[in-house]
Image: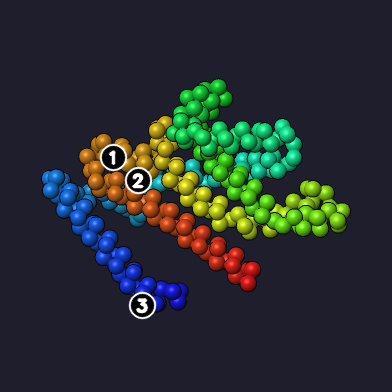
């Protein structure tokens, strides 16, 4: 917190907000020059609608709920896929390494949008899964590839002497991972994995292409019905920004917590 109290940092923060105001004013003036009629008062009902003794969530909040569900479920499956793939690549088995390597190269060298279409239009009819499950499967496979490399790098970062010491104590490879390697590797991979989850939030917008009524899809539908193009898309962008900034704050807290534990 002391960094924010320095005069130089205060000047930078003030300059940043002045720049934001100037950019916002320029954007607002540009839209008015196009003859756009701003109607922000119509946006609130798309977030919530007041009822007697409470409120009902509007389509944007409903879409946000679907987005959060997809992100959380995909995050769990991507960690499982990433962990299994990382262990396969580190197993020393030729077949396991080839499976892991083939999966990583396939996923990382094809666009996510194409993967979403392949899962939904090709795999889903064969496997008999629905639209929601297809979206989760596509995102889990995509993010799992990157999670695998993060986990593998975290395991490889453990000094070789830790392995040798564990084996000298008579531990099996499974016990080495469980009691020696993984507890140390987890502290190294949590911050990058959390950052990867932020990418998952942004990537989840692509599932709207297969008619998943997430935040992006709800925004598209509202714009098509109301022509509130600027207001709705700015609102959707701000909701995504708020969500990812919250997760970024969580990453910082985790990093500070890990630093405090080491010091």
Dot 2 and dot 1 residues touching (CB under 8 Å): yes
Q: Which element type, helix, strand or loop, lies under badge 2?
A: helix
Q: Residue 60 carries which label?
A: 2
User: In terms of sequence position, does the residue under pointer 3 or pointer 1 come before the other?
Assistant: 3
Q: Residue 66 carries which label?
A: none
Q: Mark 3 points at which residue?
A: 7
Q: How far apart are marks 2 and 3 (CA)?
A: 40 Å
Q: Mark 1 points at which residue?
A: 222
In this rendering, the label closer to the viewer, 3 or 1: 3
- Labels 2, 3: front one: 3
Q: Name the element at disc 1.
A: helix
Query: The residue tagged with tag 3: helix, strand or loop?
Result: helix
Q: In this view, does 103 lie to the left or right of 19?
A: right
Residue that appears at 31% across and 37% down: 221
Q: Which residue lies furthest to the top in this view?
A: 126
| Residue 116 seen in the figure | no
Q: Left of 144 or right of it: where is 94?
A: right
| Front residue of 221 and 44 | 221
Q: Which of marks 2 and 3 is nearer the N terminus?
A: 3
Count up the numbered dots: 3
x and y, in percent, of residue 144 in the image: 57, 41
At 55% from the left and 22% from the top, the residue drawn is 126
Q: Quadrant of residue 23?
A: bottom left
Residue at 87% in and 53% down: 170
Which of 239 and 160 lies nearest the eye of the viewer? 160
In terms of sequence position, does the residue under pointer 2 or pointer 1 come before the other? Answer: 2
State whether residue 54 is above or below residue 208. below
Image quadrant where one finds the C terminus: bottom right
Q: How crowded is mark 2: few (under 14 residues within 10 Å), some or many (20 or more)?
A: many
How packed mark 3 is, by other alpha carbons closer than 10 Å (few <14, some 14-19, many 20 or more), is few
Disc 3 from disc 1: Cα separation: 45 Å
Q: In which quarter of the image is residue 215?
A: top left
């Amino acid at each position: 917190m002391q960094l924010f109290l320095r005069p130089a940092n205060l000047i930078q923060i003030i300059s940043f907000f002045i720049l934001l105001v100037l950019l916002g004013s320029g954007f607002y003036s540009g839209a008015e020059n196009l003859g756009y009629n701003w109607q922000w008062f119509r946006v609130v009902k798309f977030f919530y609608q007041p009822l007697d003794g409470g409120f009902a969530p509007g389509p944007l909040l409903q879409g946000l709920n679907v987005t959060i569900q997809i992100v959380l479920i995909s995050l769990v499956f991507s960690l499982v896929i990433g962990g299994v793939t990382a262990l396969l690549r580190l197993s020393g088995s030729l077949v396991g390494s080839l499976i892991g390597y083939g999966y990583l190269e396939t996923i990382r060298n094809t666009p996510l949008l194409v993967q979403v279409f392949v899962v939904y239009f090709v795999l889903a009819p064969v496997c008999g899964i629905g639209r929601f499950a297809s979206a989760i499967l596509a995102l889990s496979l995509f993010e799992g590839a990157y999670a695998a490399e993060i986990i593998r790098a975290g395991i490889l970062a453990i000094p070789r002497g830790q392995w040798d010491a564990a084996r000298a104590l008579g531990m099996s490879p499974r016990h080495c991972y469980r009691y020696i390697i993984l507890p140390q590797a987890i502290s190294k991979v949590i911050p990058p994995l959390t950052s990867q989850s932020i990418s998952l939030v942004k990537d989840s917008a692509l599932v709207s292409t297969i008619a998943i009524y997430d935040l992006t899809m709800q925004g598209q539908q509202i714009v098509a019905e109301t022509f509130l193009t600027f207001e709705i898309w700015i609102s959707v962008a701000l909701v995504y920004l708020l969500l990812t900034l919250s997760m970024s704050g969580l990453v910082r807290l985790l990093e500070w917590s890990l630093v405090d534990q080491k010091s």
